[in-house]
């Protein structure tokens, strides 16, 4: 895109590029799982927070933007394929009087699967999360169904606020592994009934979500060193001048404007170079598209709103970094998941049974599925 001679073009979307590669070379494009929901029109606090509080706020802001779950670009609605089938099977075995606890529930995708299976009468569901989820879909439920669903935000998996032997089934979809398992695992067993069972889907260290997260963390590190966002900020005040013919002409001879454009063009050249050849450059292309949109905002309504949007966006990029770091750090390799399986079986007691397998979607590993009963 060109605005009166000011270069602001964006790269083509990654999915289209990979589809082209697939047609030419037989390469199957990866299934992108993560979109960081980086819109910045909401009020954002920049208070000095502890690291734990900062991560809680980052996840709260993420859920507040409406995604049902964190794999929004892999599953258009709720979980499907192997993951959805796994949970449908678990919930189909439930009885209507049973109670379910969901650890790290987010905006409640598992609750929605449960309600879809039992729209009228069925098991009760309680979800806890360190953040404060904002599930908008609850408002669409019939009164009877809504009463069976309860969210409790700001709750640590390591300190569950429930009596012993409260739940028939404890579940978690990409949740419990984010906690300190040495503390949360005993808590889970405490609130589980002696005859209860567990069903967990946790991050697999060799999964596609973890691979994509590592790539996006590399891109965020690049952006933190890059001049792209700062040079874009310096460009924004000049865009209002594009609305006036005389002011537009003066831009061509304004040394500060010329330097701002030179600096931005150089930074944009670097980001384009990085996109070329990257297997998953979506985050970088999203950032370029957002900056173009900020420039359009500056032209249409003035620099202050555009600068506010950019400031908020930078905070949300940091939120994304924190969430991605959480994901990568929490993923379990084979030794880790086997150790968790053994601890849960041992805590369940004599005669405990368990099963463990990797779940795949479109031939890509997505997580570990662990059952203990």
Image (cartoon, rainbow, N blue to C red):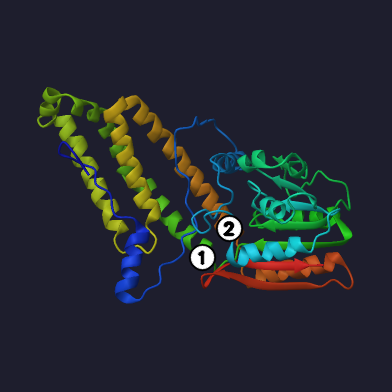
Residue linked to disc 1: 208
Q: Depth check: give the residue in front, 334 or 280.
A: 280
Q: Earlier in the sequence, mark 2 or mark 1?
A: 1
Q: Depth check: give the residue in front, 365 or 225.
A: 365
| Position of residue 33 measured from the top left corner of the image (x, y, whole percent) | 50, 58
Residue linked to disc 2: 329
Locate residue 210 relative to residue 296 in the image: left or right. Answer: right
Residue 215 visible? The answer is: yes
Q: CA distance from mark 2 to mark 1?
A: 15 Å
Q: Which image quarter holds the N terminus?
A: top left
Could you tell me which residue is drawn at 35 percent across and 58 percent down? 14
Locate residue 232 relative to residue 282 in the image: left or right. Answer: left
Q: Which image quarter holds the C terminus?
A: bottom right
Position above or below: 293 against 341:
above
- Residue farthest bottom in this picture: 26
Locate residue 236 relative to residue 119 in the image: left or right. Answer: left
| Position of residue 305 measured from the top left corner of the image (x, y, whole percent) | 37, 27
- Crowding around mark 1 (Cα neighbors within 10 Å: few <14, some 14 to 19, many 20+) is many
| Position of residue 13 measured from the top left corner of the image (x, y, whole percent) | 34, 55
Could you tell me which residue is drawn at 36 percent across and 51 percent down? 284
Residue 332 visible? The answer is: no
Could you tell me which residue is drawn at 27 percent across and 49 percent down? 10
Could you tell me which residue is drawn at 18 percent across and 36 percent down? 259
């Amino acid at each position: 895109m060109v605005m009166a001679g000011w270069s602001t073009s964006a790269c083509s979307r990654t999915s289209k590029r990979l589809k082209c590669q697939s047609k030419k070379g037989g390469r199957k494009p990866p299934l992108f799982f993560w979109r960081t929901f980086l819109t910045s029109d909401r009020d954002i606090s920049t208070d000095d927070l502890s690291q734990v509080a900062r991560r809680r706020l980052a996840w709260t802001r993420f859920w507040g933007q409406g995604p049902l779950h964190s794999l929004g670009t892999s599953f258009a609605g709720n979980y499907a394929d192997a993951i959805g089938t796994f949970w449908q099977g678990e919930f189909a075995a439930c009885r209507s009087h049973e109670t379910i606890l969901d650890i790290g529930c987010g905006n409640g995708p598992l609750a929605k699967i449960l309600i879809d299976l039992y729209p009228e009468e069925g098991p009760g569901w309680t979800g806890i999360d360190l953040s404060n989820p904002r599930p908008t879909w609850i408002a669409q439920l019939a009164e009877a169904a809504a009463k069976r669903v309860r969210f409790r935000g700001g709750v640590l998996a390591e300190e569950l606020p429930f009596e012993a032997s409260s739940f028939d089934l404890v579940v978690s979809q990409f949740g419990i592994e984010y906690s300190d398992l040495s503390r949360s695992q005993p808590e889970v067993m405490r609130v589980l009934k002696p005859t209860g069972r567990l069903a967990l889907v946790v991050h697999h260290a060799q999964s596609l979500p973890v691979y994509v997260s590592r790539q996006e963390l590399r891109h965020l590190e690049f952006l933190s060193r890059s001049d792209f966002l700062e040079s874009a900020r310096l460009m924004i005040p000049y865009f209002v001048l594009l609305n006036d013919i005389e002011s537009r002409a003066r831009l061509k001879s304004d040394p500060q404007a010329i330097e701002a454009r030179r600096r931005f063009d150089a930074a944009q050249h670097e980001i384009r170079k990085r996109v070329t050849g990257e297997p998953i450059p979506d985050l970088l292309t999203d950032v370029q598209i957002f900056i173009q949109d900020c420039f359009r905002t500056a032209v249409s309504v003035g620099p202050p709103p555009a600068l506010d949007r950019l400031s908020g966006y930078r905070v949300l990029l940091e939120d994304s970094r924190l969430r991605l770091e959480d994901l990568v750090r929490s993923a379990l390799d084979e030794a880790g998941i086997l150790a968790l399986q053994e601890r849960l079986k041992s805590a369940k007691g004599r005669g405990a049974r368990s099963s463990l397998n990797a779940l795949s979607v479109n031939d890509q590993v997505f997580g570990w599925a662990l059952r203990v009963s």
